[in-house]
Structure formats: C-alpha cells, structure tokens
Image: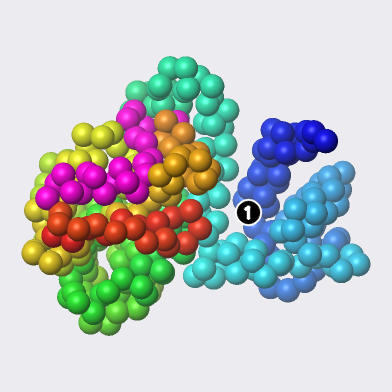
Amino acid sequence: MKNPGKILQTGMAFWASKALLSAVEMGIFTELAKGPAPFEKLSGRIGLHPRSARDFLDALVALEFLERNGDVYSNTPETDHFLDKRKPSYVGGILEMANHRLFGHWNRLTEALRTGLPQNESREHGKGVFESLYADPARLKEFLSAMTGVSRGSNMVIASTFPWRDHGTFVDIGTAQGDLAVQIAKANPHLSGKGFDLPEVAPVFEEYVLENGVSDRLSFQPGNFFEDDLPKADVVLMGHILHDWDLQTKKMLISKAYEALPDGGSLVVYEALIDDERSKNAFGLLMSLNMLIETPGGFDFTGKDCKSWMMEAGFSSTRIEHLAGPDSMVIATK
C-alpha cells in the first residue's frame, strides 16, 4: 500500500529543524546540563511565552532531543554531550550558523537551481561569503566555531587513526578555529604543527590553541592560498576546504599541497564525500547544494573524483577511509 508519510515528513522537516535551532539559540540544552528542571522553572529561565512553552518543550521531547519525567525536563545523553556550550564536545556552532544564516538562504534554493548563482549575502552587496564573514570579527568567530562543530568528530578520528608515528610535522590548510590541529597535537605529543589561514583568523586560532594547552607545539601562519605557497610539512591537511571552490581551484590547491610535501609525505583531504554511485550519501549531495547557495563555483565530489585529481597532480598512491558521520578522508602519498 502506498504511503505518503515520507513525502510529508520530508516536506515539512523544516518544522523540526527550526524547533531544534531555536532551542540551541535559546540555550535550553546548556541550561538543562546543570540538571533536570520542572516546566515552570525551565520556561521562566529561558524566557518562553506561556502560550507556546509547553508545546515547544514537548515537541523537543517527541523529537527525542529532551526527556520528560512527569513535569520535569532533562537532556538526552546526546544533547547533554553535544549541545551544552560549556563542554568541549559542543557541536552547536554549525547549528547556530544554520539558524542565523543558512536557514534563510536556503529559502531561495529554487532560484539558485535555476540561475546557478549564490543566494547568500552576496545578493545584497556583491561580496563573496568569505569577504563578508572575514570583515566582521563577531560573525567570523561564529563561522569559525561552526566549522569546529561540523568537523569535531572527524578531527578526533584523524588525530587517533592516521599513522602519525611516521611523521613529525603537519599543516592544516584553512585551519579556521584550529580544532583539527588541536586534536592532532593533543593525541600525538611528538608532533608540531601549523594552522594556515587568512590573517584575520589568527586571534581566534591562537585563543583556541591556548585554551587547549598546545600552544607550545602549534603556531599560526598567515597567508592566502591563492597567492602564497603552502607551508612545507610532512602532512598537509584540508578539511572541508576543497568543496568551496571550482574544479580549477581544487586542482590548483592539490598541486600546491604536492609541492609542499617531501617524498613520502601525505595529503589528507576530508569532506562529506559523495558515494561513487551518487545515490546514498544524501548529506554530501545536500552539502553540494549548500555550496551552490554559498559560493560562485563550489561543489562536493566523490572519492573517485578526488583520487583522480590527486593522481593527476603526481601523487603515487591514494586511499579512502571513513571518518565520522558522512565524512570520509582521501589520503594521497607523494
């Protein structure tokens, strides 16, 4: 028997999405990380209007983001771990950015699909997304924190599973807040590394590295990978970087990484790689549509695509390893 359930659930999925994003914005999960709270106390602390308070909180229960025992609400194990702003495991930065920026931009997806043009801030003043974000320190910090949120799980896997014992130095290209570099340094005391990004990123990177106690082994190198050579290191990493750019730029960055490496060195590229059949990793495909919304030429790609670009640049071998969630890494050896 035919069932419209999935059609309706997906078509109205923005209801659930916005409920979660508003809960993150209002700090509900951080508040409940202090301990369970009864309805009146919780709704008062976060400033909910009486008309909608119970429906909102109970919707979060039904969506399995909160638990309720009688009239007392509490976090689930997952929301307590990942959505408490005071914990290092917080991934809500990407949700904060989705709430403030992407939710509205995606309302113009149809226009993007018909025109091929970005639908973000560039519509209003002609500047690219990175020019706009990097010009505003507060918005830049939110963006860099968002990159940590979307990358944290994969960063920790790379830090613990890549054969770091064979190397002594690394550089993280487009380092953002620096979480990949931090996780690698914390898990591998013998390594020293650099974060490479535009100069505006330096204060955010240096603050984050200091907070994590690895400033003795990590440093920031300002630069522009369109204009400058990449810093030399045993391992060059690019996490959620290549998908921002068109094919020509992707190949240029891979070639620059090749030149920065010694023989035996490795390039690590990780993204929400689209499966080679282009039919399973919906997150990767939707991320590519997000690049349509956000950039003039960016797109996500398959592991097979990335391996071919690496071999074209001169790398002698490549392999793919799954990381966390939708992310996988492509490792190329020079």
As shown in the figure, which amino acid type bears the numbered disc 1? Val
Magenta residues (range): 293-314
Residue lying at the far front in this picture: please name it: 1
Q: Residue 235 sits in which quadrant?
A: bottom left
Q: Nearer the viewer, residue 73 or 44?
A: 73
Residue bearing the label numbered 1: 24
Q: Nearer the viewer, residue 120 or 136?
A: 120
Residue lying at the far right in this picture: please name it: 70
Residue 213 in sight from this viewpoint: no
In the image, residue 168 lies at what x, y percent? 17, 75
Is 34 left or right of 184, judged from the image as shown? right
10 Å neighbourhood of mark 1: few (<14), some, or many (≥20)?
Answer: many
In the image, residue 114 lies at what x, y percent? 47, 17
At x 35%, y 23%, the residue is 126
- Tell me the quarter of the image containing the N terminus: top right
Q: Nearer the viewer, residue 163 or 179?
A: 163
User: In what element is the residue under mark 1?
Assistant: helix
Residue lying at the far bottom in this picture: please name it: 189
In the image, residue 49 lies at what x, y percent? 81, 46
In the image, residue 172 lies at what x, y percent? 26, 60
Q: Residue 57 sits in which quadrant?
A: bottom right
At x 60%, y 62%, the residue is 83
At x 18%, y 74%, the residue is 167
Q: Residue 152 sits in which quadrant?
A: bottom left
In the rendered image, residue 296 lying in the magenta stretch gets the answer: yes
